[in-house]
């Protein structure tokens, strides 16, 4: 089949490498301001599931590799690294069965839209921490979302997926039907051997009160903060999300350089319950706070406003993440050392400490987790600093790695290749390989991955 024939069969648009708008369209695929090489010869903007099937069949018939693109939020730009990029941005249908507490959504539905629609029905879902991220790659890699202690890693609230396979067939996979595909769709991430065109989700009741307390400390207090957090979180229920953020002091602070924020967000059934949990958590908190926000109501729209400010679109990002079972002081100390040397003032680190009774993952491709989840974000604007920031990030992760069990694919530095921490357990990695060989024998979705472009 020729490209013109493909164009004739699609409701959506095709952009080829010869089209004038190709460079801009290619760069726009990726959320990170640091764009990957312009590798895609065809960008297929699918308007419907049949377009996805046509694009996959076309690629298979012409020996081309394929990458699905949800929102292009994986920081390494992996979504654009194939001959044919199937852009799923228009597949954003959303329907909710309120009584059954279920939803069927297209992959392009974003966290912020989900939160807003679900909130109108008193429902919720373990949505990711930034509003612009779509469900597409978020759920496929696992999904470390709000209130994941109580609601679990997001992919374990997926009931079924609709998937276009490498031969162009559309299948539904769930625990009862095509169970191996369903197993892989919960955590395989970019190793998945198909394109998810819809997710069926189990929803949760919306918490009546979401309250946040933030304590700001100078960087030197990091050990004290970590020791206190380790103690109080060891008895915390699963509906408390505790994160230490290390970032530059905002201008209104009486200090300069990096500071530590101890952020506790509670998802509770009443305001009284939320306040009681926050009070309990605050017991013995280190003295010397620079500033404190106490039990501020933070519904999802407020949470998303806050996170959007920390991670502005258009900036350049180099990001890596870790799961750890080491002590919180050990991990935070290493992260603080890294942040003290951060080459750009916008950079930040988030280190979450999960409750000991946080929900555990079921058997699925998502197979690495720890009580500590940390992510280091190199954020900058000048392309000339690319080398310096990426080298700093890698040195930082190398220093933390001996304390770690693995990395989380959604925020992993995939460009490190085999030198990075493992994403899957050895058994899960082997099973994903086997399933890929069965469902994608020609390696349609496993094409060569190249390095990020430095421009
Ligand atoms: C600002 C920001 C905040 C974030 N916050 C969080 C957070 O709180 N929690 C969290 O868990 N993650 C978070 N992430 C990471 C994010 O969840 C992942 O990067 C995820 O891949 C984004 O989804 P996407 O559809 O944009 O992925 P893309 O970059 O579009 O795709 C990445 C890869 O995933 C695969 N893929 C994507 N969609 C499909 C599909 N429908 N079918 C088959 N394969 C597919 C493809 O292999 C593709 O190459 C954040 C990222 C950003 C940029």
Image (cartoon, grey):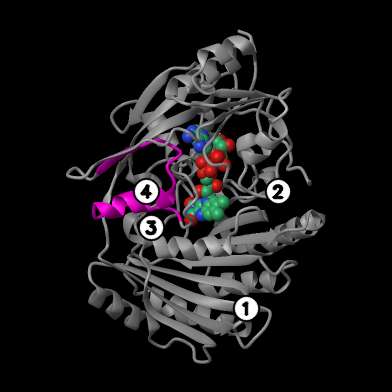
Element class at badge 3: helix
Element class at badge 2: loop
Q: Nearer the viewer, residue 65 or 427?
A: 65
Residue identified by numbered label 1: 249
Looking at the rendering, the stretch of residues picked out in magenta corresponds to: 102-128
Cα–Cα span, label 2 and label 4: 28 Å
Q: Nearer the viewer, residue 116 or 332?
A: 116
Cα–Cα span, label 4 and label 3: 16 Å
Residue identified by numbered label 4: 114
Cα–Cα span, label 2 and label 1: 25 Å
Q: Position of residue 235 (x, y in %)?
A: 34, 75
Where residue 148 is drawn, which disc sits there?
3
Q: Position of residue 85 (x, y in %)?
A: 60, 29
Cα–Cα span, label 3 and label 2: 30 Å
Element class at badge 4: helix
Q: Earlier in the sequence, mark 2 or mark 4?
A: 2
Q: Residues within 10 Å of mark 2 (few under 14, many from 20)?
A: many
Q: Residues within 10 Å of mark 1 (few under 14, many from 20)?
A: many
């Amino acid at each position: 089949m020729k490209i013109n024939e493909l164009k004739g069969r699609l409701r959506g648009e095709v952009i080829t490498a010869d089209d004038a708008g190709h460079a801009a369209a290619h760069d726009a695929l990726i959320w990170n301001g640091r764009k990957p090489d312009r590798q895609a010869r065809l960008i297929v903007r699918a308007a419907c599931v049949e377009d996805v099937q046509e694009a996959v069949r076309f690629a298979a018939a012409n020996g081309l590799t394929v990458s699905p693109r949800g929102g292009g939020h994986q920081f390494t730009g992996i979504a654009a690294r194939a001959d044919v990029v199937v852009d799923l941005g228009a597949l954003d249908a959303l329907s909710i069965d309120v009584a059954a507490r279920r939803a069927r959504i297209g992959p392009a539905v974003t966290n912020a839209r989900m939160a807003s629609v679900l909130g109108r029905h008193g429902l919720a879902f373990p949505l990711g921490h930034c509003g612009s991220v779509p469900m597409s790659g978020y759920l496929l890699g696992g999904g470390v979302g709000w209130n994941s202690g109580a609601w679990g890693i997001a992919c374990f609230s997926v009931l079924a997926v609709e998937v276009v396979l490498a031969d162009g067939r559309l299948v539904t996979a769930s625990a009862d039907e095509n169970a191996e595909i369903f197993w892989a769709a919960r955590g395989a991430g970019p190793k998945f051997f198909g394109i998810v065109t819809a997710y069926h989700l189990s929803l949760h009741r919306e918490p009546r009160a979401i309250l946040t307390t933030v304590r700001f400390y100078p960087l030197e207090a990091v050990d004290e903060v970590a020791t206190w957090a380790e103690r109080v979180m060891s008895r915390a229920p699963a509906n408390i999300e505790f994160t230490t953020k290390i970032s530059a002091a905002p201008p209104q602070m009486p200090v300069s350089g990096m500071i530590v924020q101890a952020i506790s967000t509670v998802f509770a059934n009443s305001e009284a319950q939320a306040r009681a949990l926050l009070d309990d958590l605050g017991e013995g908190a280190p003295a010397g706070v620079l500033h404190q926000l106490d039990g501020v109501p933070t519904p999802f729209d407020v949470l998303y406003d806050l996170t959007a400010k920390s991670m502005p679109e258009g900036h350049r990002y180099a990001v890596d993440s870790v799961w750890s079972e080491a002590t919180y002081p050990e991990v935070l100390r290493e992260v603080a050392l890294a942040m003290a040397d951060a080459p750009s003032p916008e950079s930040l680190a988030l280190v979450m400490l999960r409750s000991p009774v946080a929900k555990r993952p079921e058997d699925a491709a998502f197979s690495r987790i720890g009580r500590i989840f940390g992510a280091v974000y190199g954020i900058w604007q000048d392309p000339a600093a690319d080398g310096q920031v990426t080298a700093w990030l890698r040195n930082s992760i190398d220093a933390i790695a001996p304390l770690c069990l693995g990395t989380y694919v959604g925020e992993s530095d995939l460009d490190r290749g085999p030198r990075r921490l493992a994403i899957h357990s050895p058994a899960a990695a082997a099973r994903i390989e086997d399933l890929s060989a069965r469902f994608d024998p020609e390696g349609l979705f496993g094409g060569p991955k190249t390095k990020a472009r430095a421009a």
